[in-house]
Amino acid sequence: MTVYTGASNRWHEDYALGRPGWPPRVVELAEVPPGATVLELGAGTGKLTRLLLPRFRQVVAVEPDEGMRRLLGRHVPDAQLLAGRAEEIPLPDGSVDAVFCAEAFHLFDWEEALAEIARVLRPAGALMLLWNLPAGPTEPSIEAAERLLLERAPAGLPYDPVDLNTRRYADGEWRQALAESSFDELRELTVPNPQTVDREALLSFLASMGWLADLPDAERIPLLEQVRELLPAEQYRRRWETHVHWTRLRDQTKDRSEMPHARRPV
C-alpha cells in the first residue's frame, strides 16, 4: 500500500503516474517534417516529449517548475531540457520549426507568449496546442470518491476539482488572443484517448489536483486514504478525448504585398 508523504515530495510523481498521455497521431497533424527542430513549452514530466523525440531531429523542452524538470530529465534524457517559461523563451530568434504546448497554453500570458513563440519560430513555423478533456464516465464508477472530494474542495477554483477541464480553456478567451496574433486561422480536431489505469494510478491522478496537493499533510493524507477505500476495483477505464488545435506563423511578406499601394504624388 502506498504511504502518502508530504505534498512537495508527491505532487510531481502523482502527476507523472496518474495524468493521461497523448495519442501518437497528434504529433503528425501539423505536418512538421522529421528533420525539424521542435520546441515544447511547459513540457511537464515529459508525456508529450516522449512522442516528439523519436519523430523529430531535435527536441527542446522548456519547463519552469524544478520538480517537473527533474522528472522530465529522468524520463526523457535525450531531450535538450531548459529552465524557462513561455513569456521568456531561452532560445534565439528563428531557431525552431514548430512549437508544441500540451495542457499548458491556458496557463500562459497569451499576448506575451504568442509574441515570444512567433519570435523563435522560423517562417511559416507551426504551433500546436493540446488539451485532454473528459469524454464520459470512468468505468467502474468512481462517483463516490469524486463526491467525497467535491465536498472537501474549496469553492471558486479555476478548474474542475476532480477532473481535467480548466475554465481558461473552456471559456475560449485564448482563441481571441490567437486571432489577434501573427498566426493563421486555427485548425482543430478531436481524437479519442482512452486510458486504462490501476487503483494506484487513479488515486495519483486525484492526488495531483492542485487544491488537494496544497492541503496540509494532516488533512491530505487521511483524505486520500478515505478516497482509496472508495476505489475497490483493480483497474479503471477512463474516457478522454484530446482536443488538438494547430496553426502556422502568418507570412508577413504576403501580408505586406496585399496591402494597398500608396499613391505616388503627382
Image (cartoon, rainbow, N blue to C red):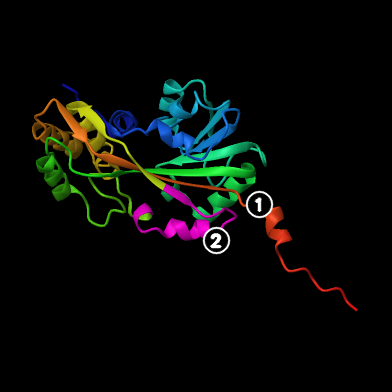
Q: Earlier in the sequence, mark 2 or mark 1?
A: 2
State the residue in front, 73 or 37. 37
Q: CA distance from mark 2 to mark 1?
A: 15 Å
Foreground pick, 246 / 48 = 246
Q: Residue at x 14, y 50 (%)?
A: 151
Q: Disc count in the image?
A: 2
Residue of label 2: 180
Is residue 8 toward the left or the right of residue 31 in the image?
left
User: From the viewer's perspective, is the residue at label 2 or at label 1 nearer?
Assistant: 1
Kindly state the secondary structure of the residue where label 1 is placed: loop
Residue at the spot of label 1: 251
Per the image, is 70 magenta? no
Q: In which quadrant of the rendered view does residue 228 lie?
A: top left
x and y percentages locating residue 53 in the rendered image: 50, 25
Residue 157's tag is none
Q: Is residue 168 above or below residue 30?
A: below
Could you classify mark 1 by the number of other residues whose Cα lies within 10 Å: few (under 14), some (14-19), or many (20 or more)? some
Horizontal placement of 96 versus 143: left or right? Answer: right
x%, y% of residue 233? 11, 28
Q: Residue at x 62, y 42 (%)?
A: 121
User: At 8% across and 30% down in the image, what residue appears?
Assistant: 232
Which residue type carries mark 1?
Asp
Asked whether residue 209 appears in the rendered view, the answer is yes
Q: Is residue 157 above or below residue 32?
A: below
Q: Which range is magenta?
A: 169-188
User: Residue 263: horizontal and vertical position, in percent?
Assistant: 82, 74
Residue 4 can be seen, yes or no: no
* Residue toward you, 178 or 74: 178
Q: Quadrant of the N terminus?
A: top left
**Residue located farthest toward the bottom when viewing the structure as drawn:** 266
